Image (cartoon, grey):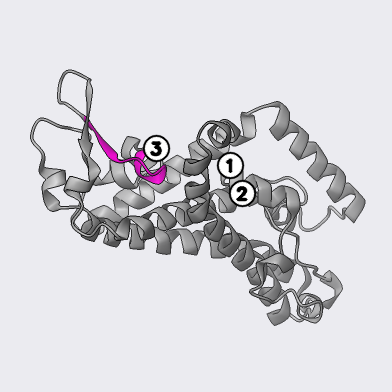
Amino acid sequence: MLDWMRTDPLGFFTFMLYRAPAVLIALTLHEISHGYVAYWCGDRTAKDMGRLSLNPFRHLSLIGTILMFTVGMGWAKPVPVNPYNLRHGRRDDFLVSIAGVTMNFLLFLLATLLMVAVNEQLWKPVLFQLPNADLVTRTDFLGFSGTNFWQIIQNSEYIWVKATGNGYYSVLDAAQYMQTPWLIHLQRFLYQFAFCNLGMCIFNLLPFPPLDGFHVVNDVLLKGQLKLNPQVFRACMLGLLLVMNMTNFISSFISKVEYAVQGGVLRGVLALFGLL
């Protein structure tokens, strides 16, 4: 990402025009979900502190937001929750913990449905009926691991086509195959929105303090026995950041899970509408 910013600043800026609103919406709705579920469960802390707000700047964490912009996974400033105010203790803590990732996954599903719908209006049907090509498929345009997904998301003017049998790629002028060109801007935003929400969902389900996945494991498997103070949470977060900075193990794992989940959901949606 940093190399791209140095070598192609205009392309990187254009990319961020789509990524920025996707990140801000994903982070904001994630945190609001935590706050509202806590409020419904009896804890007014987030409401009284003004955290049930659509203003994204009330929720942003500097490091977590930077990671969301650069790698598509991250976190926001945690919504304050007083567990002593929750009516049903461990059960309510579990509900508050899964609220954010549930919201992100639902937003990912919505974005995927809209991506498929927009894709049918964006491209001419002949594009998916080209002879002697086995890579011009809807999954290649909509799947996170697809060649043309990354071509389009990075503002490329070309479509990559793999000729059947010989393994070679050729390129086509994307503009010639668009039937509603302005929809490309909506499609790029939806790509980013789906990508960020699914990445945020998977990352926050990791069972490391203070991520939501830790609370889920603690509430369900450990019966709430681990009582960690804020200092321990901060130390664990620092350790997680160091691991992510020094190795690519976590990012590689999340990418594999993200591609697998998105690929399965996308194939299911395409099959549902007879487009696979």
The amino acid type, in three-letter code, at marker 2 is Met
Question: Where's residue 115, x and y in %?
Answer: 34, 57
Question: Where's residue 77, x and y in %?
Answer: 75, 60
Question: Can the viewer see residue 229 in this picture?
Answer: no
Segment colored magenta: 151-161
Disc 1 versus disc 3: nearer the observer: 1
The amino acid type, in three-letter code, at marker 1 is Val
Tell me the CA gap for discs 2 and 1: 6 Å
Question: Can the viewer see residue 21 in this picture?
Answer: yes
Asked which quadrant contains residue 83, the reply is bottom right
Q: Secondary structure at mark 2?
A: helix
Q: Residues within 10 Å of mark 2 (few under 14, many from 20)?
A: many
Q: Are marks 2 and 1 in contact (CB under 8 Å)?
A: yes
The answer to if 153 sits in the magenta stretch is yes
How many numbered callouts? 3
The amino acid type, in three-letter code, at marker 3 is Ser
The answer to if 124 sits in the magenta stretch is no
Q: Which residue is mark 2?
A: 68
* Disc on res. 103: none
**What residue is shown at x 71% (from left), y 60% (from top)?**
60
Q: Is residue 2 above or below residue 16?
A: above
Asked which quadrant contains residue 223, the reply is bottom right
Q: Which residue is mark 1?
A: 71
| Farthest-out residue, front | 10
Question: Where's residue 118, x and y in %?
Answer: 29, 60
Q: Which residue is mark 3?
A: 145
The answer to which of 99 and 49 lies nearer the viewer is: 49
Q: Secondary structure at mark 1?
A: helix
The answer to which of 190 and 186 lies nearer the viewer is: 186
